[in-house]
Image (cartoon, helix red, strand yellow):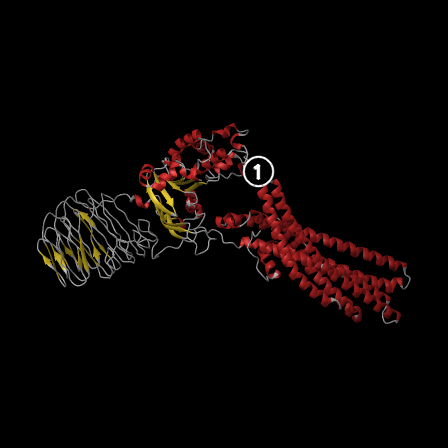
Amino acid sequence: MATTPAPAQDRSAVRTLLRLWPYVRPVRARLFGAALVAIVASCVGLVIPLALKWMVDGPIAGRDPAGVWLGALFLLLLGFTEALLFGLRRWLVARPLSHVEASMRAALYRHLQRLPVAFHDRWASGQLLSRGTTDLMLLRMFLAFPLTFLLVNGVTILVGVIIMLLQDWTLGLVILGPAVPVMVTCVIFERRYAKLARRAQDQVGDLTTVVEESVLGIRIIKGFGRHRSQERAFRDLSKTLRGTELRKARLLATIWGVIVTLPEVAIGAALVVGVVQVADGVLSAGTLVAFLSTALALRWPVESIGFLLAMSQEAATATERYFEVMDAEVEGAGGTPAATAGPGPGTGSAPDANPGSAPGIGSGSAHGTGSGCGSGTGSGSAPGLGSASGPGTRSAPGSGNGSRSRSGSGPAPDSDEGSAPASESGSGSGTGSGSAQGPGSGFAPGVGSASGPGTRSAPGSGNGSRSRSGSGPAPDSDEGSAPASESGSGSGTGSGSAQGPGSGFAPGVGSASGPGTRSAPGSGNGSRSTSGSGPAPAFGSGSGNGSRSRSGSGPAPDSDEGSAPASESGSGSPSGTGPRPGPAPVQEKGLRFHDVRFRYPDAPSDSPPVLQHIDLHIPPGESMALVGATGSGKTTLTALIPRLYELTSGRITLDGADITGLSREALRAKVAVAFEEPTLFSASVGDNVLMGAKDTAGHADLERALAVAQAGFVHSLPQGTDTPVGEQGLSLSGGQRQRLALARAVVAQPEFLVLDDPLSALDVHTEAAVEAALRQVLADTTALIVAHRPSTVLLADRVALLSGGRIAAVGTHHELLRTNAEYAYLMSGEEEGAR
């Protein structure tokens, strides 16, 4: 049951434990003080053998009772001092280490809240719980005891060995004989025990996961009578954990046996050699007693090496597991913008759902009557029918009383291959004739002509014009980039002319083009222009008395890839008296998806994305229903708006602002979400609802939200809105939980509202009441509603059909019923019947 990442191989326990230093640093003074006190206490214990030597060789040998009593009193004082110092050590570490454990647990919880949803999708909750409980308890125990006593015992052994060597170096060498085998055994033990400790702690996490799932799913277990199968699963995991713990115990018993046996043998050998030396008069009895007492005092420090190493390895494993979570990358304050196609300087985006942006400059005006003229290379006009061409040119008949021409350095439009600077112009007039002069030009009086190197003419239409210039391919889905400008103007009657190398002239007709420019019909009495280094748009028109501007980097509109700075502005006046500012166009406002693609972070890189080429615009104050078959990606799409997941590519904007440029706090203050699963917390009804509001929200906000969600049932609960709902809100019905989740979403009156099938658990009458109240909320917000039933769809102004990870159709409910077979099939309920 693999629920955690594979641990790092051949990790250093010391290096791993050193990562605890930032948490230990604030209490380092007391820890170092405790270690110093423990060292002094151990050294006091080593003075006792020396006192025994003095007593044996002095008062006892001299039969001095007073000296014996004095020595006994001194030994008692030493023992009392040692005990007092060890008690002081424990007092010094107890409070600060509890603080270290609490601060590490708080840091872990805070970090878990900031980790992305993708992390929690991968990790079992039991593994996270075991890291916040069992692992941190092991770390506190390590800091309180093994960490101190590895240092204290090391110093004690070193001082004791020096004392023994000073007393008799031959006996000292006998005692040091087992040192090498003991160290080799410790190295082997450490390596093996580390693997078993890691395995055991991971298995504890797995066991915790099973217990948590069984408690949360107790209704399912009992409802389906699966308690025996769950018990078997628990028993199997418990048996596996028991086996691992037994292997740990066997390994610990082995090293402990070696560590205890070898020093005991050395002490026995030293006793035999010492007795012989005393018998030979080489060594005094007091010296032998002091030597053996010192050796016996070192038994505990030596024998404790085994379990101190074992606890240190468990602490190192716990540290490693703790930092596996802490090292996971959290959500940034603003986040990293998702990669987009065709980046460039700037921060805005061009309209029509393109991944990128393009600022430029343009203006337009509206007049009662007007005329247009221009000059450039390779332009022409053609009223009626007729054509003329030069090198690399192509012409097409005009229609009505207008003309259009194109030149450029990329392929000509309409699937013609090759490249040439292109310009197009179109204008309308009553009647007229056209001529074209220049390299490769033709002349057709009264008919029309188009000429110039690499030019093409096409019909104009209406009484307006539009122009575009650029260094890349001409519009109509051609790829590349080009600075481009467009202008369009409308007039009642008028005339135009085009002059320059390879230009044409047609009185009463009118064309305007420059190097690499294009003009096309305008609409209404306005104009629009765009300039930039991206592909030119395929269609544009000015209108009315308004203005619009945009700046940014990326491709220009209409799905052309590339990037270009661009801005647009338009203004109009009723009688040609000059521009007058107006409101920003609606396209900049609302919720907008720009060529969004998404693949789950854990998915293979070559797997198809869940969502691709999502281009969708929800204007301010409009609600849109999102409809699609099960598994089409509806819930995934809604999760991208509050940035629960990061986009693979593309952009999402709220009122023109890229969500990756907003802090998550600011973004989630704008967007409220009601998820398909109505999760509630172990708190009161009021606390659960107000979780979606600011801290300043009060009782009036709570009552308003409950009224919208038709959740008046809460007033009949024992404590009203102060009634605890229990873990997961399981004390309430599914419909009641769903209404409280809806109230939580609307309580803050968000600018943008995302509802994931919010009424699925309601009966027909309650659903109708909620819908009636919800319509008032939707009138003041921009909403995206995942819907499966026609009644929910009718809440929305428009409907978007999601199919195969793409937006397949957008329209009203009735329009899609008439024109889209898939949508009609989904709304008919046949899908449920088929399943």
- Residue 513 visible: no
Which residue is at the front of the view, 159 or 235?
235
Which residue is at the front of the view, 333 or 653?
653
Q: Does residue 770 appear left or right of residue 10 in this picture?
A: left
Q: Does residue 264 appear left or right of residue 470 in this picture?
A: right
Which residue is at the front of the view, 465 or 99?
465
Q: Residue furthest front?
A: 834
Q: Residue furthest left?
A: 445
Q: Does residue 102 appear left or right of residue 595 in this picture?
A: right
Q: Residues within 10 Å of mark 1 (few under 14, many from 20)?
A: few
* Tag 1 residue: 224
Number of on-image labels? 1
Q: Does residue 478 appear left or right of residue 447 in this picture?
A: right
- Residue 728 visible: yes
* Dot 1 amino acid type: Phe
At which x and y percent is residue 86?
72, 54
At which x and y percent is residue 158?
72, 65
- In the rendered view, would you say 468 is above or below 830? below
- In the rendered view, would you say 714 is above or below 300? above
Q: Looking at the image, which residue is at 69% across and 63% down?
A: 186
Q: Residue furthest top?
A: 716
- Dot 1: element: loop
The quarter of the rendered structure image containing the C terminus is: top left
Q: Residue furthest right?
A: 63
At which x and y percent is residue 795?
37, 35
At which x and y percent is residue 160?
75, 64
